[in-house]
Amino acid sequence: MKSARSLLSNGAALLCLTLIAASVRAQNPETVIVEVAFFSQPSSRLLPAEPADLDWADQALVLRETANSQVREIDTTRQELNDEMARMSRQGYRLQLHKAWTQPVGLGMPIAVTDTDSPASNMGTDPQRVQGLVGIDQGSGLEANVSFWLNHVAADGSPITERIEQTRKLRLDETHYLDHPSLGVLIRLRAN
Protein backbone atom coordinates (compact mmCIF):
# COMPACT_ATOMS: atom_id res chain seq x y z
CA MET A 1 0.00 0.00 0.00
CA LYS A 2 2.81 2.34 0.95
CA SER A 3 4.65 1.74 -2.35
CA ALA A 4 1.46 2.40 -4.33
CA ARG A 5 1.07 5.76 -2.58
CA SER A 6 4.75 6.51 -3.12
CA LEU A 7 4.45 5.57 -6.79
CA LEU A 8 1.35 7.73 -7.14
CA SER A 9 3.06 10.61 -5.37
CA ASN A 10 6.16 10.26 -7.57
CA GLY A 11 3.96 10.11 -10.67
CA ALA A 12 2.12 13.27 -9.63
CA ALA A 13 5.42 15.03 -8.94
CA LEU A 14 6.77 13.97 -12.34
CA LEU A 15 3.60 15.24 -14.03
CA CYS A 16 3.91 18.59 -12.21
CA LEU A 17 7.55 18.94 -13.24
CA THR A 18 6.67 18.13 -16.85
CA LEU A 19 3.89 20.73 -16.85
CA ILE A 20 6.17 23.35 -15.28
CA ALA A 21 8.89 22.64 -17.85
CA ALA A 22 6.36 22.92 -20.68
CA SER A 23 5.10 26.21 -19.26
CA VAL A 24 8.63 27.62 -18.97
CA ARG A 25 9.40 26.49 -22.55
CA ALA A 26 6.22 28.22 -23.79
CA GLN A 27 7.22 31.46 -22.04
CA ASN A 28 10.88 31.21 -23.12
CA PRO A 29 10.82 29.31 -26.40
CA GLU A 30 14.02 28.34 -28.16
CA THR A 31 12.50 29.07 -31.58
CA VAL A 32 9.99 31.79 -32.42
CA ILE A 33 7.98 32.96 -35.37
CA VAL A 34 8.75 36.63 -35.97
CA GLU A 35 6.22 38.64 -37.96
CA VAL A 36 6.73 42.26 -38.99
CA ALA A 37 4.56 44.64 -40.95
CA PHE A 38 6.27 47.88 -41.96
CA PHE A 39 4.05 50.72 -43.13
CA SER A 40 4.08 54.41 -43.98
CA GLN A 41 1.67 57.19 -43.16
CA PRO A 42 1.41 59.10 -46.47
CA SER A 43 -0.44 62.05 -44.96
CA SER A 44 2.39 62.68 -42.47
CA ARG A 45 5.31 65.03 -42.95
CA LEU A 46 8.41 63.22 -44.24
CA LEU A 47 11.40 63.11 -41.92
CA PRO A 48 14.43 62.60 -44.18
CA ALA A 49 17.21 60.40 -42.84
CA GLU A 50 20.53 59.06 -44.03
CA PRO A 51 20.18 56.07 -46.37
CA ALA A 52 21.38 52.68 -45.21
CA ASP A 53 25.10 52.06 -45.64
CA LEU A 54 26.03 49.93 -48.64
CA ASP A 55 27.04 47.16 -46.23
CA TRP A 56 23.84 47.47 -44.15
CA ALA A 57 23.15 43.70 -44.26
CA ASP A 58 26.72 42.37 -44.05
CA GLN A 59 26.42 41.42 -40.36
CA ALA A 60 22.93 39.90 -40.79
CA LEU A 61 21.28 36.84 -42.28
CA VAL A 62 19.44 37.90 -45.43
CA LEU A 63 16.05 36.20 -45.18
CA ARG A 64 15.54 35.50 -48.88
CA GLU A 65 19.10 34.17 -49.33
CA THR A 66 19.93 32.32 -46.12
CA ALA A 67 21.05 28.71 -46.16
CA ASN A 68 20.70 28.60 -42.36
CA SER A 69 18.21 25.81 -41.72
CA GLN A 70 17.11 27.45 -38.46
CA VAL A 71 15.83 30.57 -40.24
CA ARG A 72 13.03 30.10 -42.74
CA GLU A 73 10.41 32.40 -44.18
CA ILE A 74 6.95 31.07 -43.40
CA ASP A 75 4.01 30.81 -45.74
CA THR A 76 1.78 33.90 -45.90
CA THR A 77 -1.21 31.79 -44.81
CA ARG A 78 0.41 31.54 -41.35
CA GLN A 79 0.75 35.31 -40.93
CA GLU A 80 -1.36 36.78 -38.13
CA LEU A 81 -1.14 40.54 -38.77
CA ASN A 82 -3.30 40.55 -41.93
CA ASP A 83 -6.45 41.80 -40.16
CA GLU A 84 -4.57 44.61 -38.38
CA MET A 85 -2.95 45.72 -41.63
CA ALA A 86 -6.29 45.65 -43.50
CA ARG A 87 -7.79 47.85 -40.78
CA MET A 88 -4.84 50.26 -40.95
CA SER A 89 -5.03 50.35 -44.74
CA ARG A 90 -8.65 51.50 -44.49
CA GLN A 91 -7.40 54.33 -42.25
CA GLY A 92 -4.93 55.51 -44.91
CA TYR A 93 -1.73 53.72 -43.89
CA ARG A 94 0.28 52.10 -46.70
CA LEU A 95 1.76 48.65 -46.17
CA GLN A 96 5.35 48.61 -47.41
CA LEU A 97 6.48 45.14 -46.29
CA HIS A 98 4.95 42.17 -44.46
CA LYS A 99 7.20 39.20 -43.65
CA ALA A 100 7.27 36.32 -41.19
CA TRP A 101 9.93 33.74 -40.45
CA THR A 102 11.11 31.25 -37.85
CA GLN A 103 14.37 31.71 -35.99
CA PRO A 104 16.12 30.66 -32.79
CA VAL A 105 15.85 33.28 -30.04
CA GLY A 106 19.60 33.28 -29.40
CA LEU A 107 20.61 33.59 -33.05
CA GLY A 108 23.08 36.38 -32.29
CA MET A 109 22.58 38.34 -35.50
CA PRO A 110 19.71 40.27 -37.06
CA ILE A 111 17.62 39.15 -40.00
CA ALA A 112 17.78 41.41 -43.07
CA VAL A 113 14.55 41.79 -45.04
CA THR A 114 13.82 43.67 -48.24
CA ASP A 115 10.88 44.35 -50.48
CA THR A 116 11.99 42.09 -53.31
CA ASP A 117 8.74 42.53 -55.23
CA SER A 118 9.32 46.22 -55.91
CA PRO A 119 11.61 47.57 -58.58
CA ALA A 120 14.73 49.19 -57.22
CA SER A 121 14.61 52.95 -57.43
CA ASN A 122 17.21 54.89 -59.34
CA MET A 123 19.16 56.15 -56.32
CA GLY A 124 22.77 55.71 -57.40
CA THR A 125 23.50 52.22 -56.15
CA ASP A 126 19.86 51.15 -56.57
CA PRO A 127 18.90 50.21 -53.02
CA GLN A 128 15.71 48.30 -52.46
CA ARG A 129 12.67 50.44 -51.72
CA VAL A 130 12.45 48.80 -48.28
CA GLN A 131 15.43 47.63 -46.24
CA GLY A 132 15.05 46.27 -42.72
CA LEU A 133 17.01 44.66 -39.91
CA VAL A 134 15.21 42.78 -37.13
CA GLY A 135 17.17 41.31 -34.23
CA ILE A 136 15.55 39.25 -31.46
CA ASP A 137 17.46 38.87 -28.20
CA GLN A 138 16.64 37.28 -24.89
CA GLY A 139 18.36 38.72 -21.86
CA SER A 140 16.00 39.58 -19.03
CA GLY A 141 13.15 39.05 -21.51
CA LEU A 142 12.46 39.07 -25.22
CA GLU A 143 13.63 42.21 -26.97
CA ALA A 144 13.49 43.36 -30.60
CA ASN A 145 16.00 45.71 -32.22
CA VAL A 146 14.35 47.06 -35.37
CA SER A 147 15.65 49.34 -38.15
CA PHE A 148 13.77 50.01 -41.38
CA TRP A 149 14.60 52.33 -44.26
CA LEU A 150 12.05 53.47 -46.83
CA ASN A 151 13.65 54.82 -50.01
CA HIS A 152 11.54 56.99 -52.32
CA VAL A 153 12.03 59.43 -55.12
CA ALA A 154 10.64 62.94 -54.55
CA ALA A 155 8.56 64.80 -57.12
CA ASP A 156 11.71 66.64 -58.26
CA GLY A 157 13.51 63.31 -58.81
CA SER A 158 15.77 63.53 -55.78
CA PRO A 159 16.13 60.50 -53.50
CA ILE A 160 14.56 60.58 -50.03
CA THR A 161 15.13 58.05 -47.29
CA GLU A 162 13.11 57.72 -44.11
CA ARG A 163 14.18 55.56 -41.17
CA ILE A 164 12.65 54.08 -38.06
CA GLU A 165 14.96 52.54 -35.45
CA GLN A 166 13.75 51.28 -32.08
CA THR A 167 14.41 48.70 -29.40
CA ARG A 168 11.40 47.26 -27.63
CA LYS A 169 10.72 44.66 -24.93
CA LEU A 170 8.25 42.10 -26.27
CA ARG A 171 5.87 39.48 -24.96
CA LEU A 172 4.90 36.38 -26.86
CA ASP A 173 1.56 36.44 -28.66
CA GLU A 174 1.15 40.21 -28.35
CA THR A 175 1.26 42.70 -31.21
CA HIS A 176 3.62 45.60 -30.53
CA TYR A 177 3.47 48.93 -32.36
CA LEU A 178 6.68 50.86 -33.03
CA ASP A 179 5.81 54.47 -33.76
CA HIS A 180 7.45 57.20 -35.82
CA PRO A 181 5.94 60.40 -37.24
CA SER A 182 5.73 59.02 -40.79
CA LEU A 183 6.49 55.29 -40.44
CA GLY A 184 5.48 52.42 -38.20
CA VAL A 185 6.12 48.75 -37.53
CA LEU A 186 3.86 46.08 -36.10
CA ILE A 187 5.83 43.17 -34.66
CA ARG A 188 4.55 39.95 -33.17
CA LEU A 189 6.44 36.95 -31.75
CA ARG A 190 4.97 33.56 -31.06
CA ALA A 191 6.39 30.20 -30.09
CA ASN A 192 7.09 27.95 -33.05
Image (cartoon, rainbow, N blue to C red):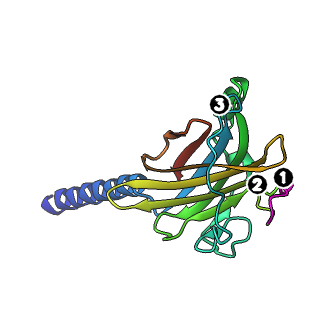
User: Is residue 179 part of the magenta span, yes or no?
Assistant: no
Q: Nearer the viewer, residue 64 or 20?
A: 64
Closer to the camera: disc 2 or disc 3? 3
Residue type marked 1? Ser
Instruction: Name the spot of residue 94 as percent of width and height, x first.
Output: 73, 35
* CB-based contact (under 8 Å), mark 1 and mark 2: yes
Real-space CA distance between mark 1 and mark 2, rounded to the nearest whole angstrom: 6 Å
Question: Mark 2 sits on what residue?
Answer: 115
Q: Give coordinates of residue 96: x percent, y percent.
A: 73, 44
**Badge 1, how many Cα within 10 Å: few under 14, some, many 20+?**
few
Residue where numbered disc 1 is placed: 118
Numbered tag placed on residue 44 in the rendering: 3
Q: What residue is shown at x 65% (from left), y 38% (from top)?
A: 46
Q: Does the magenta stretch include residue 118?
A: yes
Viewer-nearest residue: 46 or 91: 46
Mark 2: few/some/many CA within 10 Å (<14, 14-19, 20+): some
Q: Residue at x 22, y 61 (%)?
A: 10
Q: Which of 129 and 124 is in front in this view?
A: 124
Q: Position of residue 187 (x, y in %)?
A: 56, 45
Residue 192 in sight from this viewpoint: no
Q: Which image quadrant: the N terminus?
A: bottom left
The answer to whether 4 is drawn above or below residue 166 in the figure is: below
Residue 174 placement (x, y as % from top left): 49, 40
Query: Could you say whether the residue bearing mark 2 is in a helix, strand or loop?
Result: loop
Range of magenta residues: 117-124
Residue at 60%, 64% (x, y): give it: 111
> For residue 54, what is the image quadrant?
bottom right
Quadrant of the frame with the C terminus: bottom right
Marks 3 and 2: in contact by CB < 8 Å?
A: no
Tell me which amino acid carries mark 3.
Ser
